[in-house]
Image: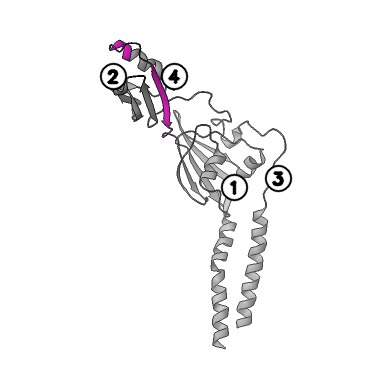
């Protein structure tokens, strides 16, 4: 009986080692210019490689507003409300979303001049891109909601979640994105992205990334988890003799 269990454990270990060796290989990148065009048959029409050249303030972003030599009118950090407005001393609630930091500076300068502040000098900076959140779920090491910097790509979202699991189906990645027309869903192949043969799209705030699972790989993962049991059985058999 001991020999049978030992044999079974050895066979399983050998097979699982072979399976893992096959899964561990990383495809070679294709030398040259990477693909930047979306694949329409994968639903990628609403996704782009180009990073934005300017940043428009968004609800929940945090900004600092400094009025030179006017500390009473300055704020180290203030958050833009969900309605797109921000509340400033003397001015009350004013629109901020969908403006660049420079445009908002000009608007605050104009408003302060209108209420009697002489030659105001205003500086606006982004303290935190709090609106930039991406949800990563499915077959990744650490699913969750992550902050990201403007211009980050799909590959960055996967890296934030500590990469795909060994059981992941890297060719089955779905990205869900809200648009005025409704929810967009596009498919991506992470293996091709790593090779440079598929678009690595720029993320948008609120994107949801779902990595699929390879059913065959799940079988091997479950089998590996069970391996210590074979050792227990073998030891128990030896002790019994």
Q: CA distance from mark 3 to mark 1?
A: 15 Å
Question: Which residue in the rendered view is the most extreme toward the bottom?
Answer: 241
Q: Gap between marks 4 and 3, in whole Å?
A: 44 Å
Query: Which of marks 4 and 1 precedes in the sequence?
Result: 4
Query: Within 10 angstroms of label 1, few (less than 14), some, or many (20 or more) residues?
Result: many
Q: Nearer the viewer, residue 178 or 27?
A: 27
Residue 51 image offset from top left, x and y in percent: 55, 28
For marks 4 and 3, give the one nearer the viewer. Answer: 4
**Relative to residue 149, is residue 4 drawn left or right?**
right
Residue marked by disc 3: 28
Name the residue located 56 percent from the left edge and 49 percent from the top edge. Answer: 164
Q: Nearer the viewer, mark 3 or mark 1?
A: 3
* Residue span colored magenta: 112-131
Q: State which tag comes first along the sequence, 3 or 1.
A: 3
What is the C-alpha distance between the residues marked 1 and 4?
A: 41 Å
Residue 183's disc is: none
Q: Are marks 1 and 4 in contact (CB under 8 Å)?
A: no
Question: How far is the residue under mark 3 from the one under mark 2?
Answer: 58 Å
Residue under numbered circle 4: 102
Q: CA distance from mark 1 to mark 2?
A: 52 Å
Element type at mark 1? strand
- Does residue 79 appear in the picture of this structure? no
Residue 91 — which label?
A: 2
Mark 3 near mark 2, Cβ–Cβ under 8 Å? no
**Residue 227 percent across, percent down from the top left:** 57, 69
Q: Which residue is mark 1?
A: 170
- Distance from Cα at disc 4 to Cα at disc 2: 18 Å
User: Which color mode does the image show?
Assistant: one colour
């Amino acid at each position: 009986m001991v020999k049978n269990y030992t044999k079974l454990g050895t066979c399983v270990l050998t097979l699982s080692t072979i399976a893992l060796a096959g899964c561990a290989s990383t495809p070679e990148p294709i030398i040259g210019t990477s693909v930047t065009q979306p694949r329409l048959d994968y639903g990628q029409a609403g996704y782009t490689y180009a990073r934005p050249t300017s940043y428009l303030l968004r609800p929940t972003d945090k900004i600092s507003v400094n009025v030179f030599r006017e500390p009473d009118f300055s704020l180290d950090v203030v958050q833009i409300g969900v309605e797109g407005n921000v509340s400033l001393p003397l001015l009350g609630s004013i629109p901020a979303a969908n403006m660049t930091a420079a445009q908002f500076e000009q608007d605050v300068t104009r408003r302060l001049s209108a209420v009697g502040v002489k030659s105001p000098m205003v500086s606006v900076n982004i303290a935190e891109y709090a609106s930039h959140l991406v949800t990563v779920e499915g077959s990744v090491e650490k699913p969750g909601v992550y902050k990201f910097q403007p211009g980050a790509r799909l590959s960055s979202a996967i890296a934030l979640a500590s990469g795909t699991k060994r059981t992941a189906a890297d060719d089955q990645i779905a990205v869900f994105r809200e648009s005025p027309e409704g929810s967009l869903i596009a498919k991506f192949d992470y293996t091709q992205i790593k090779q440079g043969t598929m678009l690595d799209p720029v993320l948008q705030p609120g994107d949801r990334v779902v990595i699929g699972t390879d059913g065959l790989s799940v079988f091997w993962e479950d089998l590996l988890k069970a391996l210590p049991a074979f050792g227990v059985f073998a030891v128990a058999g030896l002790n019994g003799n």
